[in-house]
């Protein structure tokens, strides 16, 4: 009994990594002006240069998820979507599940980007180890409970326009000259105390991770992602600080992932952050 694992491109998992882990990725849709642009056919930098043309995004259709479920080759399929509170992707996947020819479970990861990727990779690891759909879904839900994503954005204009962060507009007006930080967890973004400059913001993000490190014992292994939107150097610098703090141990998963263009359409360029989770090491 093989379990197929499917996700959407909000997880920002590169195609080579997805293929290696046996994950099928369904692309979200991006419109730049009146032109449809494939999510993998424009870079974040190119997208940022075309904001004045007008950018909109939309969810995949149920048919696209249905096709992905079939391509996964699973006798059972688990679909893991970006948070249902910021996108209609979950609804499309749920409709596909109702008409699939194999049992399909749809899981709302309650997060996005690098944190969503960590949930998907946990599910893929369980599937590769031979777990059934119930076991794969359980691995995903355990990861959802433990995963964290904290990031800084260069400005709030894109988030305000996107409407993806309710109530943030008034806060934006008070953030002039500061670096706004937020945590995306349990389905929505929650604002954190802003920093006075990019370096201070990165230090604060690292501080959140370091406090989580102090709360776990040696019987946990770390999965960590540096995430960015056209700011790879800052994301790598954060990962390096984590690795140095963890030494001589090494993270079980250590990646730098760039936000997919569909995500950058809402956050704008310059976002950088960390996503991580601590996984208990089980005896045997």
Image (cartoon, rainbow, N blue to C red):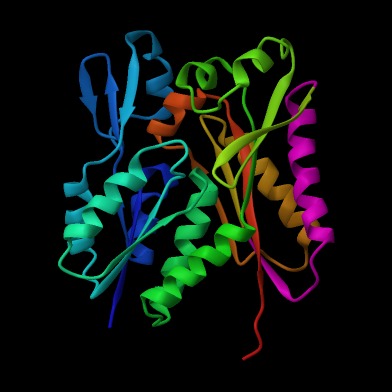
Residue 59 placement: quadrant: top left
Number of numbered discs visible in the structure rendering: 0
Q: Is residue 238 magenta?
A: no
The residue drawn where x is 57% and y is 31% is 231
Percent x, y for residue 188?
56, 39
Q: Pick the quarter of the image with the N terminus.
A: bottom left
Along the viewing direction, whichever of 133 and 148 lies nearer the viewer: 133
Percent x, y for residue 139?
50, 70
The region drawn magenta spans 196-223
Percent x, y for residue 98?
21, 58
Whether residue 196 can be seen here = yes
The residue drawn where x is 15% and y is 67% is 101
Q: Is residue 202 magenta?
A: yes
The residue drawn where x is 55% and y is 14% is 157
Q: Pick the quarter of the image with the C terminus.
A: bottom right
Percent x, y for residue 281?
66, 78
Whether residue 155 can be seen here = no
């Amino acid at each position: 009994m093989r379990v197929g694992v499917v996700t959407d491109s909000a997880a920002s998992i590169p195609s080579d990594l997805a293929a290696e882990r046996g994950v099928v990725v369904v692309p979200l849709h991006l419109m730049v002006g009146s032109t449809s642009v494939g999510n993998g056919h424009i870079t974040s930098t190119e997208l940022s240069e075309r904001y004045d043309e007008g950018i909109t995004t939309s969810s995949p259709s149920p048919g696209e998820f249905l096709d992905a479920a079939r391509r996964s080759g699973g006798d059972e399929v688990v679909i893991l979507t970006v948070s249902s509170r910021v996108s209609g992707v979950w609804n499309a996947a749920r409709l596909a599940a109702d008409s699939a020819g194999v049992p399909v479970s749809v899981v709302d990861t309650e997060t996005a980007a690098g944190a969503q990727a960590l949930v998907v990779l946990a599910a893929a690891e369980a599937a590769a180890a031979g777990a059934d759909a119930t076991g794969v879904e359980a691995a995903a839900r355990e990861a959802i409970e433990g995963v964290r994503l904290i990031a800084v954005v260069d400005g709030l204009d894109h988030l305000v326009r996107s409407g993806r962060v309710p109530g943030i507009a008034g806060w934006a007006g008070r953030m002039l000259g500061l670096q706004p930080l937020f945590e995306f967890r349990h389905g929505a973004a929650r604002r954190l105390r802003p920093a006075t400059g990019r370096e201070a913001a990165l230090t604060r993000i690292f501080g959140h991770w370091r406090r989580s490190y102090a709360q776990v014992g040696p019987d946990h292994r770390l999965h960590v992602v540096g995430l960015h939107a056209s700011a790879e150097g800052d994301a790598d610098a954060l990962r390096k600080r984590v690795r140095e703090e963890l030494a001589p141990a090494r993270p079980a998963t250590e990646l730098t992932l760039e936000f997919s263009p569909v995500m950058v359409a809402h956050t704008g360029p310059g976002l950088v952050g960390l996503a991580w989770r601590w996984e208990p090491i089980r005896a045997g």
